[in-house]
Image (cartoon, rainbow, N blue to C red):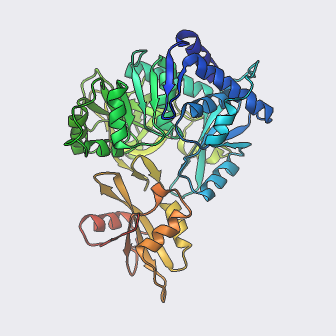
Amino acid sequence: MTLADLVAGAAERWGGRVFVTDDGGRAWTFAETAARARCVAGALAARGVGAGDRVALMAHNSAEFVAAWLGTTLAGAAVVPISTVSAPPEVAARTAQARCKLIVDDATASALVRGAPLSSLPPIADDAVAQILFTSGTTGVAKAAAVSHASLVTHTRNVARTVGLGVDDVVLGALPLTHSFGCRMVMLLALATGARIVLMRRFDAARALALLDAEGVTFWPAVPTMLAAVSARAQSDGPPPRALRWVLSAGAPLADALCRRAEARLGCEVRQGYGLTEASFSTIDAPPAPRAIGSVGRPVAGVEVRIGADGEVEVRGPHRMLGYLDDAGATAAVVDAGGWLRTGDVGRLDADGRLWIVDRTKDLIIRGGNNVYPSEIEAVLAAHPAVAEVAVVGRPDDYFGEEVVAVVVRRPGHTVDAGELADFARARVAATKVPREVAFVDALPLGPSNKVLKRELRAMLADGRLPTTKASR
């Protein structure tokens, strides 16, 4: 199966039902969305985009985004989603690495949906690349995970079986569709189940609460930061949403206390799921199974989960990437001959088959559902003329899950403050990656091999031995 089959099947089964509404006042049916996706495919073909090409999609949530994403795959090209908050150097690096033929922003997407429909779709193999998602290791070198049509379609249908969505469901699309979480659990999941999606151009807590109630939303995929924001309005904004059945939280650790606050505000259960760029959702704690707060649930249909060496979580199934684009060595380092993917996370499986994430083997920081790779930020800050050495670590944060902290050794004879360093980083990386706190030290703690002891830095932050200065936001 390919995404063309998924689009055609949805249009045939639910053609006259509304599929997507957005902040621009659009309300497109499944049939209209499919037709506009073919218009995008036709417009791309007219621009010379076809099978095997890559198209960067850097736009906000909208009905036109949905048509542009689907239309790109109908044309035989692969979608390369790029966050709208990405800094220009990031955009340039990612589009160059993926060898993108075109960058589609909001204005371009609006133009593409007005193109002439592609009369005959090109043949597409189910193992052809449909999407390229960027991730990064602790080395800071960006890697591009290639995902096939078969992976997206098969796993979406398996997730649908797991979460039990149907034609009477309404899904709030507050997550950016440029993120794998939003793409899979909002757009594609609804396309496979006949549910309606309500898209927000960007998240706002008050607006989200209003939409949850006014639109009769039944299912909300969210990151913990969103739940913290709506929970903060618990005292002033009235009763819980009238139709919300449950919330799926993923993308960052969810503190038990925040889970309970969110449930009190929203009037429904908040459950967790677990996945990663290379393997999307592996587990979901979906109703009606009994819930265990803190667990990320049982394996999604078709997915296998095991605990490998040193407690590392390993997964296998149709949700797994084909591999890292043009990097067989990096792929072999995480995927074994049997198809098992090493996640880099430490976890345990309980007697009921639930997965519990215990720790991360990498230094990855997850701030508000966004991945922040310390070495990338360290490389940026090290370029500042006043910085001699720098280490970036995460500090636990009630709101964002984790906060980004830079620990800096100044060059002799140079001065720089936290705000200057934040501004320096902000010009070079996405705003979500900019350190919000900076600690200035005379030397970084080193181990026997002269590697920086980041665990020690995190301990020093936790017990107050490492004072920090807030950077301007």
Q: Is residue 451 visible?
A: no
Image quarter for residue 101?
A: top right
Residue at figure coordinates x 29%, y 45% from the top left = 228
Q: Nearer the viewer, residue 231 or 152?
A: 231
Horizontal and vertical percent position of residue 427? 55, 64
In what quadrant of the picture does the N terminus appear? top right
Residue at figure coordinates x 48%, y 17% from the top left = 194
Horizontal side of residue 383 vs 444, given as left or right:
right
Q: Nearer the viewer, residue 35 or 289?
A: 35
In what quadrant of the picture does the C terminus appear? bottom left
Horizontal side of residue 35 vs 345, given as left or right:
right
Q: Nearer the viewer, residue 114 or 329?
A: 114
Which residue of the protein is positioned furthest toward the top in this rendering?
Answer: 13
Q: Is residue 465 above or below residue 415?
A: above
Horizontal and vertical percent position of residue 154? 54, 22
Horizontal and vertical percent position of residue 418? 41, 73
Numbered-mark total: 0
Which residue of the protein is positioned furthest toward the front in this rendering?
Answer: 25
Residue at figure coordinates x 63%, y 43% from the top left = 105
Q: Is residue 362 above or below residue 217?
A: below
Q: Is residue 260 visible?
A: yes
Q: Is residue 382 above or below residue 264?
A: below
Horizontal and vertical percent position of residue 331? 59, 43
Horizontal side of residue 69 vs 432, given as left or right:
right
Residue at figure coordinates x 62%, y 57% from the top left = 88
